[in-house]
Amino acid sequence: MDKLYDITLIKGILQRYGFSFSKGLGQNFIINPSVCPKIAEYGVPDESYGVLEIGPGIGVLTNELCKRAKKVVAVEIDKRLIPVLGETLSEHKNLAVINDDVMKLDLNDLIKREFGDMPVSVCANLPYYITSPIIMKLLEDKLDVTCITVMVQKEAAQRLCAMPGSRDCGAVTISARYYCEPEMLFKVSAGSFMPAPKVDSAVIRLNVRKEPVITPKDEKTLFKVIKAAFLQRRKVLPNTLAAGLSISKSDAEKIIEKAGVDKSARAEQLSMEEFCKIADSTYDYFTCSK
Ligand code: SAM
């Protein structure tokens, strides 16, 4: 259905199904007609693609994805929306809707089962309450996808696309950059949604790396160090690492010294390579002291 931007039509459909918006599930549906075609243009590299969508809502973005992709699989947690989607997207034979919580699914298994040999991308207007956990799950599960195109809160987009060493940089910046090359695409105003959220949004694309940009001795230690370093971002590294890794300040200093990193630096000033060196030195500290 192409008129899913029409507020009167949407309200009529939702009323018929007795649907009311759930703030807790981050339900802000797109009503600006120019937004979804643009997201779908970036989100579907070509017509051979299978696309995994998270949170189709009433299907306004799904509709655009189905027009461009070979197959779309949309995962929606809210069972009240399943019959709505059955009506709004009935013309698309290349769509499968799964009623589940994306955080609980084995996405590698789903991708193999649903898309077979197709190249795959992820595309979504993400529920804001759970943006970072979803993105980290998509990346940490090492899905066989080429890119992840998502609309998120503007501040989250800025953080994800920040350069390491810049003020906007956070744990999620470094973790995301380990797996992908982030790209800021375009901003979307709060008035483009129903109901309108309090903040503006932005669409970003995470282009998944074929080869890692750094190769730590142990990935788990790298992520532990990143989290620990940003736990108290105003503090210098020895203090924040000591607290985050439950070690003494003098041991934290030794780890940082061995890594050849400046002890007076703060997490937001470090490059990817410096995080990798601290992670390797932390790994040696824990494995050698056992
Ligand atoms: N794609 C629609 C659009 O752009 O208008 C709706 C986007 S709305 C921001 C987020 C959607 O994600 C809602 O439909 C919500 O029910 C769904 N959702 C929230 N948490 C989810 C989860 N854990 N797993 C799957 N879907 C979820």
Image (cartoon, helix red, strand yellow):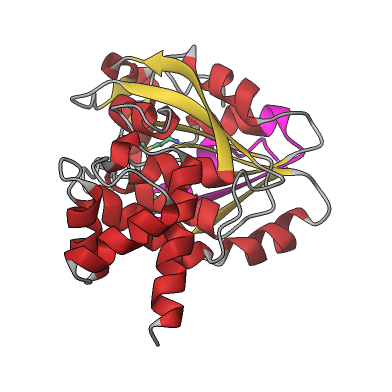
At horizontal 57% and vertical 46% (from top left) the residue drawn is 179
Nearer the observer, 50 or 8: 50
Nearer the observer, 239 or 257: 257
At horizontal 28% and vertical 15% (from top left) the residue drawn is 191
The percent coordinates of residue 50 (x first, y second) are 72, 43
The percent coordinates of residue 38 (x first, y second) are 56, 17
Task: Name the outermost residue toward the top.
Answer: 34
Q: Is residue 250 left or right of residue 202?
A: left
Residue 85 visible in rendering: no
The quadrant the C terminus occupies is bottom left
Q: From this view, report whether residue 25 is shown above or below residue 48.
A: below
Q: Which residues are magenta?
A: 66-92
Q: From this view, report whether residue 262 is shown above or below residue 114.
A: above
Q: Is residue 86 covered in magenta?
A: yes
Name the quadrant where ligand 1 sits. Answer: top left
Q: Is residue 93 left or right of residue 197?
A: right
The percent coordinates of residue 23 (x first, y second) are 21, 42
At horizontal 15% and vertical 40% (from top left) the residue drawn is 234
The percent coordinates of residue 203 (x first, y second) are 46, 25
Number of numbered discs on residues: 0
Nearer the observer, 73 or 139: 139
Nearer the observer, 193 or 163: 163
The quadrant the N terminus occupies is top right
Task: Name the outermost residue toward the bottom.
Answer: 290
Q: Is residue 197 left or right of residue 271?
A: left
Q: Is residue 112 covered in magenta?
A: no
Residue 124 visible in rendering: yes
At horizontal 44% and vertical 63% (from top left) the residue drawn is 281
